[in-house]
Amino acid sequence: MNAEDLLGDIAFYYEDRLRQFGATAAGVDWKDEASQTLRFDQLLKLVADPAASVIDFGCGAGALLGHMRRMGFSGAYRGLDISADMIGAASSRYADETQAVFEVGAVPSAEADYAAASGIFNVRLDIGDDLWRSHVLATLARMDRAGRRGFAFNCLTSYGDADLMKDYLFYADPCFYFDLCKRMYSRHVALLHDYGLYEFTIIVRKD
């Protein structure tokens, strides 16, 4: 399977969720709005300046933008998603948002102060560990290039309960990704694994 096929399968999965549940937390495969908000709060610990610009990798229907505005963030926002349907939903939802741009793809057309990604590494379907891990690493490299001042992402944790884990989901080793980010991207890396969900968030701040 090549990268294009991989992304196509993932886009189809999320488009089916969007058709079933609309522009909601369930529409991007989260349990509920409360857990989605909690994830956003962890990611936004990256953004030191409320007027900073942000690229949202895998933006879905743009829920992070809405949360940012409610929390007082006023900077420019660029939403990026591999699903054209998701971008269509986000564009319609935020048609009056003058500081937001939405685009289809895996690589943003411009940089920003920060890059963030929520949940984009979780659903791997029947893709093997090695190929999916290569996809994760390639995406982190793109996020590093896109976020001038840093980037943040979350993953399901390999420290979860084995009997609750599902075959089509990817459970990452938080220590591996912390070490990777420290070695490759910055001396200033935070690992958040204490906010009550079976996942972790990594924050990378650049000098």
Image: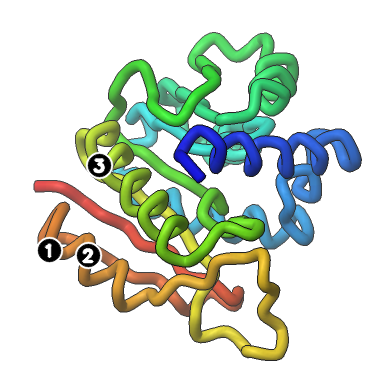
Residue position marked by numbered label 1 in the rendering: 183
Q: Which quadrant holds residue 143?
A: top left
Task: Confirm or deny contact between disc 3 and disc 2 (CB under 8 A).
Answer: no
Task: Confirm or deny contact between disc 1 and disc 2 (CB under 8 A).
Answer: yes
Give above or below for 109 relative to 54.
above
Q: Where residue 32 sits: x, y (%)? A: 78, 58
Task: Give the spatial CA distance, label 1 vs label 3.
Answer: 13 Å
Task: Give the spatial CA distance, label 1 vs label 2.
Answer: 5 Å
Which residue lies most toward the front here? 1
The disc labelled 3 sits on which kind of residue?
A: Asp
Pick the front one: 68 or 62: 62
The disc labelled 1 sits on which kind of residue?
A: Arg
Horizontally, residue 78 falls left or right of residue 150, namely: right
Pick the front one: 160 or 16: 16
Q: Residue at x 74, y 22 (%)?
A: 89
Within 10 Å of disc 3 (Cα), the crowding (few <14, some 14-19, many 20+) is many
Horizontally, residue 140 falls left or right of residue 183, namely: right
Within 10 Å of disc 2 (Cα), the crowding (few <14, some 14-19, many 20+) is some
The disc labelled 2 sits on which kind of residue?
A: Leu
Within 10 Å of disc 1 (Cα), the crowding (few <14, some 14-19, many 20+) is few
Q: Residue at x 66, y 16 (%)?
A: 91
> Sequence-wise, which precedes: disc 1 or disc 3?
3
Q: Where residue 50 sits: x, y (%)? A: 38, 35
> Element type at marker 3?
helix
Q: Residue at x 42, y 21 (%)?
A: 76
Residue position marked by numbered label 2 in the rendering: 180
Give above or below for 88 relative to 10.
above
Q: Residue at x 40, y 71 (%)?
A: 192
Residue position marked by numbered label 3 in the rendering: 144
